[in-house]
Amino acid sequence: MAGPTSFAPIINEAVNIVNRTGDYHILVIIADGQVTRSVDIPPHAVSKNEKETIDAITYASNFPLSIVMVGVGDGPWESMIYFDNYLVHRKFDNFQFVEYHKITSQFSDPQMKEAQFALQALMEIPDQYRTIKAMNYLERGPYRVRTDLPRVDVFPPPQPVENVHQNHTYGVFQPNLQHTQMRAVATATTTTQYGQAASPSAPLFGSADDAQDRSARPTLQHRSSQAEMDLAQLQETLLCPICEDRKKNTVFQCGHETCQKCGEFLSHCPLCRQQIQVRIKRFG
């Protein structure tokens, strides 16, 4: 994600939800970078984004809310570790940071990776929940404070566009059948009511030969759809179906392929689900 990073808005919005419901919640934040800090800030000072995040975590400790932050990528994660260990003004330890790559890189078995990650991410949840119950947070009900924190605009995902209908087998544009029938009925009604329409004195869009040539030539949308289909087919043929980044070079006994790096961690074929017994390195 580009731009300055502050986790205060998402934490404050979670606090608003907890305040309205009065129930215990767990906020999971997946981040590819830590809070933004300028290079000209002294070592023992905090940036504006860091202060906002610290204040949000501290204020959230007044509510039945646990915060789990998962760091993906190579960080750096120094400020996240600081938030996890050295915020002393909280009512209870409500923040847990786990570094995904550091945990999963220690194991080769996929199931062991998942188990260890879940263990590390949820390790402090039972103690936090017991502390919340001991502090009677859950008995106070909703609207512990009268007003919500500053409103956070949460945008919904974009809605799919269904105006264009496409044949996914051949990538050829096909008009909506219902719209085609409606246009045909409208044309027939107009012809019946007013008789045969008089032909214009001059063709509006060129001669009949030009119209025939245009209908014979593929449109830009046709070519674009076909190019997208060809590119997708090429990627499916050459690239690993797991990471979709590296080239296929490992063949299983079932005939399906992945890249060597992904194939080392698989126990079953990702396509046909057969247990992998043979791995053959393919060159070229």
Image (cartoon, rainbow, N blue to C red):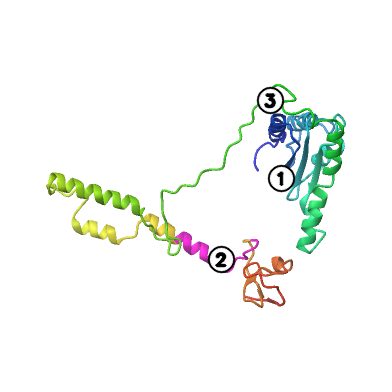
Look at the numbered disc 2 and give the secondary structure of its residue. Answer: helix
Q: Is residue 102 visible?
A: no
Picture disc at residue 236: 2
Please check the rendered image and state whether residue 229 is part of the magenta-colored stretch, yes or no. yes
Stretch of the chain drawn in magenta = 227-243
- Residue 132 x/y as whole percent: 83, 34
Point 75% across, 33% down: residue: 53
Q: Is disc 1 surrounded by few (<14), some (14 to 19) or many (20+) residues within 10 Å? A: few
Q: Which residue matches tag 1?
A: 30
Occupied quadrant, residue 283: bottom right
Estimate how packed mark 2 is, as few (under 14), some (14 to 19) or many (20 or more) residues with alpha carbons within 10 Å.
few
Vertical placement of residue 184 versus 80, above or below:
below
Upstream in the sequence, badge 3 or badge 2? 3
Q: Tag 3: residue type? A: Asp
Q: How far is disc 3 from disc 2 in space, using C-alphas? A: 49 Å
Q: Residue shown at 20%/47% (left/top)?
A: 189
Query: Where is residue 253, by image quadrant?
Result: bottom right
Q: Mark 1: which secondary structure?
A: strand
Q: Position of residue 148 (x, y in %)?
A: 68, 25
Q: Which residue is mark 3?
A: 148
Question: Mark 3 to mark 1: distance in Å?
Answer: 24 Å
Asked whether, in this view, residue 124 is left or right of residue 177, the answer is: right
- Compare marks 3 and 1 and give the one earlier in the sequence: 1
